[in-house]
Structures are given as C-alpha cells and as structure tokens.
Amino acid sequence: MMRLIGVRGATTAAANEREAILSATGELLTEIFARNNFQPSAIVSAIFTVTPDLTQAFPAEALRRQGLGWVAALGAVEEEVPGAPRFCIRVLLHVYADCPLEEINHVYLHGAKVLRPDRVRETD
C-alpha cells in the first residue's frame, strides 16, 4: 500500500562556501535515494534546514542540480545549540512508498553522524 512517509537525513559541509554546501547536500540526497530505491516521481516535497553558520547557498538548489526542480522545497535556519555540529544540513523528504517503515533508511553522514548514531551504518 502506497503511503506518504518522511525520510530524514543530515550531513555537514566542509566550509561555508557555495560549492561545499551544494556538494554536501547533493551527496546526502544521492545516498538517501540509493539506500531507499525511490523513484523521482515519488518525491513530493523537501524541507531543508541549516545551522546559522551556513549562509552561502540554499541547499534546495542541490535538488535542481539533480534534475528534481519540480519538487516543492523549503529552507530554514536551525536554532544555535551548544555542542551541535557546525556547518550542518538537514533534510526531511516527503515520499510516497510502499515498503514497511522499518525498511526506510534515514541517512546521516560526516559530522552529522553524532545526531543519530543509531542510524549510522558501518559503511558510512
């Protein structure tokens, strides 16, 4: 049965530079799509957030670079939390899927692994 689900992911950029932000976001999206075998047409929308230290690009542009410009996307800035990873990019994708929820792979890469160590695979 197809249903709308949320898929989470997070990563960190190497620096507050446009290409670093877009590269990190593109890598994150690629991993989420690969680990979950989503068809592009199944993606409904995406919400991106960044830490306050990332100001040089909108992560949603990485969707357009991957040919998904029709996906509704929104960006926001996270609150500053002591001890939180710097240069952090998070995403919540809304996707139609028919697999059990326990088979959904949420993806946490690089410095964002500390956010959800329970979701980090050994190969990350």
Image: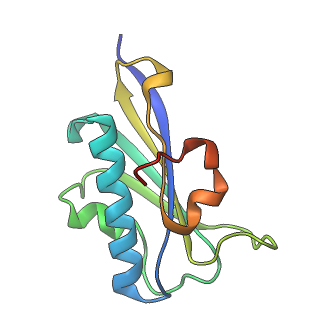
**How many numbered tags mark residues here?**
0
- In the image, 17: left or right of 68? right
Q: Given the current orientation, which residue lies at the most extreme front position?
A: 122
Q: Residue at x 76, y 73 (%)?
A: 80
Q: Residue at x 37, y 19 (%)?
A: 99
Q: Is residue 71 left or right of residue 104?
A: left
| Residue 17: % across, % down | 43, 89
Q: Residue at x 63, y 77 (%)?
A: 86
- Where 104 sits versus 57, above or below? above
Position of residue 13 measured from the top left corner of the image (x, y, whole percent): 47, 76
In the displayed structure, 25 sits above or below 21; it is above
Between residue 79 and residue 99, name the one nearer to us. Answer: 99
* Quadrant of residue 79 within the rendered picture: bottom right
The quadrant in which the N terminus is found is top left
Is 74 left or right of 41, judged from the image as shown? Answer: right
Pinpoint residue 95: horizontal percent, then vertical percent: 38, 35
Asked if residue 64 is positioned above or below residue 15 in the image, the reply reads: above
Identify the image quadrant of residue 94.
top left
